[in-house]
């Protein structure tokens, strides 16, 4: 075999070895990619995440909670006065209008009292006459005493002079009493306010003829008002004098007012079995008006703590539990309750939760514990989709 033939044979052998090695390497790489894909396919898929609307969640927070029986009643002025005519006659003038503030002693009206004026004049004349007679009798008594001492007259003359003085003193006292009565009657024709307050009613006008006892004015003191209410007889254990009362009135639906129980009736209404109570309210601001309907509750116990709605609690009477979202997963938590406000459907949690914990409520309470969840605010509009920017240098069609 020539040298050239030997060299060609060696070249073909090397080429065959190189091709074989390449095929083996390619086969090895292919097997590795296949195994990786198979491993990915065999791995378990991540658990799905359940979306929950924010309206189906509740945040635990600090708040005040109260317990106590409900009450209802009407606001009424604590201090009021009805001014009545004490003499009969025609109303000459009225000086205060309904809704006007008046002070104690202020003149409200004048009534014609011609007869009372004449009686005062007659009584004054009688007093003067009797006083003059009494002065004369006293001088006569002094003269009689001197004459008796000198032996000029008998003792009986002195006794008669003394009796005359006593009689005239009695007459003067009677005349002065009649004058005082006449002046009082004349003064009653001028009507004055017995208390400071606001005129609530004025049923008469100038020119009206009134008789003694006719109502002229009604004056109320708006600075102190009371709530005349009632409570169920079965709730009497929670009611005591001095207990705080929180209530609302229809004229101020978003405001709460407070007062304290001043009196409790010793008897219950035989028809309703309700016990009347009277609650004193400080109304120096003048916002409350008598006659408004009010409803509220007596504060039996009040405390500040973690408060949540009763609707989020399962089995509140036995073993109360709630569903809480922690680290994106739902878990069931056993809680211990404190005060329970059944009227407002709220409860205090004294153990098991922290301020700010998020709980499930509504339809979300059917979620199984252990489920991965994500809270979304469905009330917010979703952001519009933005088209990707065209690459630089791309031509516009």
Image (spheres, rainbow, N blue to C red):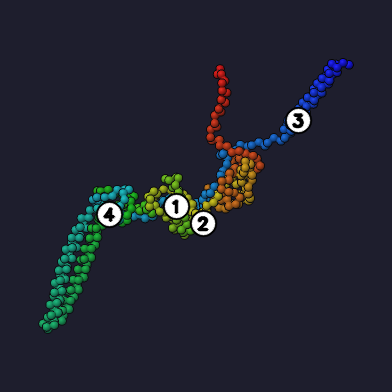
Residue count near mark 2 (Cα–Cα under 10 Å), binned few <14, some 14–19, many ≥20: some
State the SS at label 1: strand
Count of marks placed on residues: 4
Q: Residue at x 53, y 33 (%)?
A: 381
Could you tell which of marks 4 and 1 lies nearer the N-terminus? 4
| Residue hosting label 4 | 106
184 versus 41 height, above or below: below
State the SS at label 3: helix
Could you tell which of marks 3 and 4 lies nearer the N-terminus? 3
Q: Distance between the residues labelled 2 and 1?
A: 17 Å
Q: Which residue is drawn at 35% across and 53% down?
A: 221
Residue 252 in view, yes or no = yes
Could you tell which of marks 4 and 2 lies nearer the N-terminus? 4
State the SS at label 2: helix
The circle drawn on residue 230 is none
Residue count near mark 1 (Cα–Cα under 10 Å), binned few <14, some 14–19, many ≥20: some
Viewer-side residue, 170 vs 288: 288
Q: Which residue is drawn at 21% across and 70% down?
A: 170
Say left or right for 331 vs 342.
right
Q: Residue at x 47, y 57 (%)?
A: 243
Q: Do tag 4 and tag 2 residues touch (Cβ < 8 Å)?
A: no
Tell us which disc is closer to us: 4 or 1: 1
| Residue hosting label 2 | 238
Q: Where is residue 193 in the image (x, y as percent from the top left)?
A: 29, 55
The circle drawn on residue 32 is 3
Q: In which quarter of the image is residue 150?
A: bottom left
């Amino acid at each position: 075999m020539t040298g050239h033939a030997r060299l060609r044979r060696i070249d073909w052998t090397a080429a065959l070895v190189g091709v074989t090695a390449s095929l083996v390497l390619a086969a090895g790489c292919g097997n590795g990619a296949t195994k990786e894909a198979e491993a990915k396919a065999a791995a378990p898929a991540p658990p799905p995440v359940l979306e929950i609307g924010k309206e189906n969640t509740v945040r635990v927070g600090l708040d005040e909670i109260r317990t106590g029986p409900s009450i209802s009643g009407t606001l009424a002025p604590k201090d009021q006065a009805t001014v009545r005519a004490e003499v009969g006659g025609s109303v000459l003038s009225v000086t205060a209008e309904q809704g006007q503030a008046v002070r104690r002693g202020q003149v409200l009206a004048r009534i014609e009292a011609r007869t009372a004026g004449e009686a005062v004049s007659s009584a004054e004349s009688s007093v003067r006459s009797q006083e003059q007679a009494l002065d004369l009798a006293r001088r006569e008594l002094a003269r009689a005493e001197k004459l008796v001492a000198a032996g000029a007259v008998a003792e009986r003359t002195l006794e008669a002079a003394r009796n005359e003085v006593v009689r005239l003193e009695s007459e003067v006292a009677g005349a002065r009493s009649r004058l005082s009565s006449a002046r009082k009657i004349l003064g009653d024709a001028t009507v004055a306010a017995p208390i400071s307050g606001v005129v609530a009613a004025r049923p008469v006008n100038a020119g009206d003829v009134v008789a003694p006892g006719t109502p002229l004015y009604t004056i109320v003191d708006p600075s102190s008002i009371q709530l005349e209410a009632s409570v169920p007889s079965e709730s009497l254990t929670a009611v005591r004098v001095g207990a705080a009362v929180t209530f609302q009135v229809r004229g101020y639906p978003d405001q709460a007012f407070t007062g304290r129980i001043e009196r409790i009736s010793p008897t219950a209404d035989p028809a309703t079995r309700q016990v009347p109570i009277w609650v004193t309210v400080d109304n120096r601001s003048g916002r409350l008006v008598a006659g408004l309907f009010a409803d509220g509750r007596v504060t039996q116990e009040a405390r500040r703590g973690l408060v949540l709605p009763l609707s989020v609690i399962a089995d509140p009477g036995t073993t109360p539990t709630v569903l809480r979202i922690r680290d994106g997963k739902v878990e069931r938590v056993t809680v211990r309750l404190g005060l329970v406000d059944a009227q407002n459907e709220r409860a205090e949690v004294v153990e098991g939760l922290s301020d700010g914990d998020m709980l499930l409520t509504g339809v979300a309470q059917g979620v199984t514990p252990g489920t991965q969840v994500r809270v979304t605010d469905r009330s917010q509009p979703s952001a519009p989709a933005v088209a990707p920017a065209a690459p630089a240098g791309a031509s516009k069609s």
